Amino acid sequence: MSTRRHARECVMQALYAREMAEDDSRDYYIQTVIQPELQDDGVLLEFAKKLFRTTIATTDEADTVIAKHAENWEVHRINPVDRCLLRMATAELLEFEEIPPKVSIDEAIDIAKKYSTPRSGNFINGVLDSILMDLERQDRLHKTGRGLVGIDSIRDRARS
């Protein structure tokens, strides 16, 4: 059984493959990376396609936001897996109203721990926490629905 975590992992892998190939194609990576893994679950497949396409569409905006909060790091010098996860989580924060910020951040951290360096989880947590607080201050965070966690509980998690 697939989960949204698995869908996010597939999206991260497709984003990474696309970036490493320096290829602008979208459908190719959906068909070769995402679809084979999620073809048995139409709902997850559609979620993954939407997340992949949204992440690509918001890359420039996400890179601007990430650059502002990744102190002493130029976006192009960030580990490629971490960069893909930061872009994906930023896209979720900005464009997926139904996904609680805590979920987007926790998923990015956990996927980084699995696929990236030992320090990646902490790095991603710090950058995304800073992004979240800034988006909240700018009133750019528009989340709706049940189960949404407030920014204070995310800050508490980051401190612990």
Image (cartoon, rainbow, N blue to C red):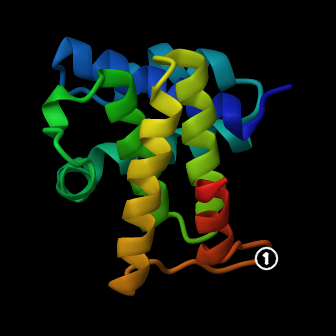
Give the total of numbered labels: 1
Q: Residue furthest right?
A: 1
Camera-side residue of 7 and 26? 7
Camera-side residue of 90 and 50? 90
Residue located 30% across and 23% down the image: 80
Q: Is residue 47 above or below residue 157?
A: above
Position in image of residue 59 (x %, y %):
24, 47
Q: Residue furthest front?
A: 160
Residue located 59% across and 75% down the image: 151
Q: Tell me the kind of residue under disc 1.
A: Arg
Q: With 5 as the anchor, is 25 left or right in this view?
A: left
**Few, some or many C-alpha atoms within 10 Å of disc 1 (few <14, some 14-19, many ≥20)?**
few
Camera-side residue of 44 and 69? 69
Quadrant in the picture for the N terminus? top right
Q: With 46 as the anchor, is 83 left or right in this view?
A: left
- Whether residue 100 can be seen here: no
Position in image of residue 117 (x %, y %):
46, 17
- Whether residue 118 can be seen here: yes
Position in image of residue 7 (x %, y %):
63, 33
Camera-side residue of 130 and 36? 130
Q: Is residue 109 above or below residue 25?
A: below
Does dot 1 land on a helix, a strand or a loop? loop
User: In which quadrant of the rendered view does residue 137 lie?
Assistant: bottom left
Q: With 80 as the anchor, is 41 left or right in this view?
A: right
Position in image of residue 135 (x %, y %):
38, 74
**Residue beneath label 1, please?**
146
Residue located 38% across and 50% down the image: 127
User: In which quadrant of the rendered view does residue 113 lie?
Assistant: top right
